[in-house]
Amino acid sequence: MAEPSLVSSGEEPEERVIEAALRPKHLDDFVGQQRVRRQLSLVLEASRMRGRSADHVLLSGPPGLGKTTLAMIIAAEMNAPLRISSGPAIQHAGDLAAILSSLSEGEVLFLDEIHRMSRPAEEMLYMAMEDFRVDIVVGKGAGATAIPLDLPPFTLVGATTRAGLLPGPLRDRFGFTGHLEFYSVEELELVLRRSAGLLDLRVTSAGFTEVAGRSRGTPRIANRLLRRVRDWALVHRIESIDARSAAAALDMYEVDARGLDRLDRAVLTALATKFGGGPVGLSTLAIAVGEEPETVETVAEPYLVREGLMGRTPRGRIATPAAFEHLGLPVPPDAPFAYSATLFDSAPPAGDDADEGDDVLADWR
């Protein structure tokens, strides 16, 4: 089982209360995502002027960027109650029918990870979103009867980290779709300044920059690192957190200057030293660092690829020159950086991981 990571975008249960206190309550307080904010503000303002519920909203993007926060803001801006559920919790059409039938007029229903909802529930959601009606099937076999149930107008806010897994008919029923991007360091500094004010912390501008630079472009991670820096400063009796204090605190938690943690560096080190920069299959790489392949693929790999430290090719993972430079290692003369995938590449060499066939399809998508 993988150990908890400070730079993982997931929320631990004990973090949720503190994280909720740091969430902005209104759209004007939400930092970053300027394009989505402007578009969403227009949608909500038009709905208020018409005196009707807002159109259904789909929010997509990596975890930790503010999808749940925006759903709460939509409910607050529309002065409507908020109901929260998730796709994995809705495994039967009856589960969804129970939720929909209990909604009040104008209520906002937030479904997190909506792409993981069961297919029967998805099909029921089509009619509910479009016609505000569901059919309840009573009985079985030839004696089954469909009883139509009218629903009050409501606003569905769906959030997904994998928009490509949503069926087309479901995507098309959302009146507004917003994709959230990773934050810049400057935007994260604004997030941290607001959070520091709420936590009553004294942090210098350089201190904010240091924490923001290690936060992987994700506000949730930035707030988590700020709380760990706060703990370090409290124990060491430091009243004002500067860049040196922030760096010392995060170094102790094994978060380096580029935001890489222990697992990230272990993956890069194994790739660069044990396999000469690659290419190497995912399963082999995971065994080398003592983790599950899914952990390496979902936790470490996305950020390493985004930072240009790792590459994915049909023959496996490779370390880039930037990875060797970051680790302070010389670049081997026979490193596979010049490898270029073509449609006419030969099959992976014998003995390579069976999962590399999936990588080929993923890369060409």
Image (cartoon, helix red, strand yellow):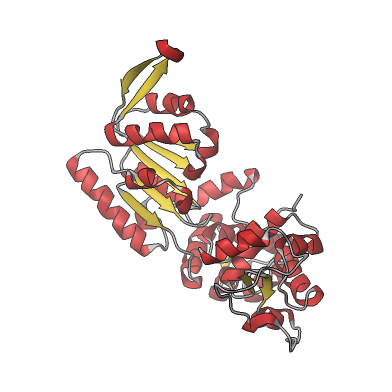
- Residue 98 screen position, x and y as percent: 44, 24
Outermost residue, bottom direction? 333
Which residue is at 25% across, 54% downward? 42
Judge from the rendering whether residue 46 lies leftward or rightward of residue 221; answer left or right. left
In this orientation, which residue lies closer to the viewer: 57 or 312?
Answer: 312
Q: Position of residue 86 (x, y in %)?
A: 50, 38
Tell me, yes or no, if residue 28 can be seen here: yes
Rendered image quadrant of residue 292: bottom right
Q: In the rendered view, tell whether residue 252 sits above or below residue 91.
A: below
The one of 264 and 107 positioned closer to us in this rendering: 264
Question: Number of callouts in the render?
Answer: 0
Q: Nearer the viewer, residue 338 or 75?
A: 338
Whether residue 53 is situated above or below residue 273 in the rendered picture: above
Q: Is residue 172 left or right of residue 286?
A: left
Choose top left, top right, bottom left or bottom right for residue 121: top left
Seen in the picture, residue 25 relative to 134 is either above or below; the reply is below
